[in-house]
Every structure is written in C-alpha cells, then in structure tokens.
Image (tube, grey):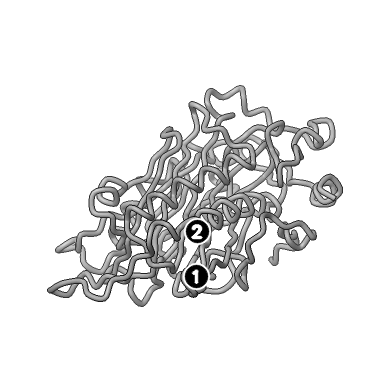
Amino acid sequence: MTNQRKRLRDLGITVGDLPVGSLNAITDVPGLEVGHCSVLEDRPSILRTGVTAILPLGKEKLWSHGVFAGSSVFNGYGEMTGRGWLEEAGQLSSPILLTSYYGVGAVHRGINQLCDDKDTHSGTHPIVAETWDGWLSDPNAFALTTQHVAHAMDDAHSGSVEEGCVGGGTGMVCHDFKAGIGTSSRKVNILGETYTVGVLVQANYGDRKDFRVNGVPVGEQIPGSEVSVPDRKRVPHVEDGSIIIVVATDAPLSSKQCDRLARRATLGLGRTGGFGHNGSGDYAIAFSTGNILKLREEGMHEGLKIIPEKDTNVLFHGVVEATEEAIVNSLCKATTTIGYKGRVVHELPLERLAEILK
C-alpha cells in the first residue's frame, strides 16, 4: 500500500539553505542502493520489526570493491558490529544493515551467510547497527532470519527511498511519535565540482518536549492532551532511545575526513532535540564513493583523489542540514502503529506541524 503521508518539503517547509538532490534522499549519491524488509505479524508473536540494507556501491560491486569510511559515537549505549575494523582500516566493503537490538545476531549471521566469499572472508566485517523496537515488537520472539536479510538485500535499489514504518524502522519511536526510516540530501560545490551528501536515519530517541524543527519547539505545542504520549518511562532506559545515522557522499574523501563528516551528523541530531542521554545509542557512519577500491586485485590503489581539508566546510553544512531533515522525514512519513501488548504510538499530525511552523 502506498504511504500517503507527506514529507517535510511537501508541507512547504525547508531546512537550511543548501539545495537538495533530485530525490532529496541518500540515493542521490550515484550508485548507492537501499532496500527494506518489514516484518508485520500478529501470530504467533506480535512483530513490528525488520531490516534495512544500504549498499554503498550497489549490488554490482558488492563485496569485491570498497570505499573509504569512518564513524562516530555520541553516546555508546548501542551496538554496531564491524566498527573495530572500520576504525582500524578506514575502509568499508560490506552493506550497512539497520535493524532491532534483538536482531543484531541474526542479521550479522545472515549477511555473512549471503557473502559470496565465505572461505577467505575478503577482509569484510559487516556493519550491523541497531535501535530498540521492543516497545512495539515482542522482544522475546527473536524473529529475524537470514531470509529477512536476503529480502532486504534483494529489495535494494536506486531511486526513491521508502520512509517511515519500514525495514529496520518498522517499530521505532521518536520524540514520542511514530517514526522509523528517514532520508534527505544536499548538493554542494567544491573547487568547481558539484557533489552530493546524503543521509539516512533510523530514529528511535527523544522526548516530546524536546522536539524542534528549524529551531521551533514543536513538541511543546503538541502536548499529550492533543496527541497521547506512549508511557515508555515505566521500562528502564526506554525513554532515552537511540539513532543510527548513515552519511554518504560522492565527494572524494579520506577515511579521516569521513570520521569528521560522521561527527557533524550529531549537530543535526541536536537541532531536532537529541541530547545523547545515558541510555541512548547515537551512532553515525560516513563513507565516500569518490574513490572506489578494488579489493580483490593485487597492486597499488592508483588514481586516488582527496579534497583539501580547508574545502570541507560545505560538506559539514550539508550533513547537518540533511540529518535534521532526514529525522523529521522519518516522523512525517510514519503512521500510527498498534503493537506489542496493544501499545499504540501515534503519528505526528502534519497539518498541526505545518500550522506551528508557518
């Protein structure tokens, strides 16, 4: 069924000053593909969970080619597999998979089973990152399997990205509204060349009172008496939540510059009302497709290009703007969901949002 909910810009609301890509999505970065597998079941367990797959170079170059990459952790109450090798080598040669906390093991096993070179391992350490969906999805079901991973991988495509209650974001909650997957992009000019920086988030953090858009305290103006707030504070740490932020660019960057880009995503999180609370897992990963590494060929990596540090500022602006908008899009596109134990999380009222911001 087509999601009839509107994105932020469809409401006539813009974030920042930089132009967006044609899709205003992470897939504006050429070659990148995104796919989802959403698991929505009521028997034998109530499941509102899933997997989202981001393929930095698409299916064609999967496993055999790599890119420079980096990461950042704002608060580390979470899990991202493969980050040790990512930080050691500064390279990424696997998909990035987003899922539930309870699905990390199954998804990690699944992507390893799907790898085309299990014998030599190809220097690949898959990235699997999580946020907790146990408020809406039965945490005791451990329902995700290799088949769900394969479905998300098979579904990966360029073009428009489905947002809201899909894939790894199926059961997520942000600022006490239903949320999930969101994306946005920006176009930047560096040394006479136009590049794209795109962001995709899996948002699952924050209190209603802290939610802001363009600096406007939207959450304070939509109280629980207007749209009910899920009573998640009865479960320890649940109110803190988490977010995974994936940043992609075709600007040629070094791995250290990717680290710097990932850190700036935290500023976009802060602009929407994220504080990195003690029980929050706030992870960002950034990669550049500007240099493609042929990992199964002998010899030197030749013809590499790196943007000078002094010319990276516009990329920093782009990732901050795109992160803020991606988070808001994850809320705009999500729909009211009834889940585990009959719990209800309501969607962000879009007409009210537009009224407040205008």
**In screen coordinates, is 24 left or right of 276?**
right
* Above or below for 61 versus 287: below
Q: Position of residue 335 (x, y in %)?
A: 71, 51
Q: Position of residue 309 (x, y in %)?
A: 39, 57
Question: Disc 1 designates what residue?
Answer: 195
Image quarter where the N terminus lies is: bottom right
- Amino acid tagged 2: Leu
Q: Which mark is residue 220?
A: none
**In screen coordinates, is 236 left or right of 31?**
right
Q: Position of residue 328 (x, y in %)?
A: 66, 50
Q: Nearer the viewer, residue 229 or 357?
A: 357
Instruction: Please say if the residues under marks 1 and 2 sit with CB atoms less than 8 Å apart.
Output: yes
- Whole-Å distance between the Cαs marked 1 and 2? 9 Å
The residue under the point 71% across, 59% down is 7
**In screen coordinates, is 165 left or right of 83?**
right
Q: Nearer the viewer, residue 247 or 166?
A: 247
Element marked by disc 1: strand
- Amino acid tagged 1: Tyr
The residue under the point 41% across, 40% down is 73
Q: Which mark is residue 315?
A: 2
Q: Nearer the viewer, residue 93 or 42?
A: 93
Element marked by disc 2: helix
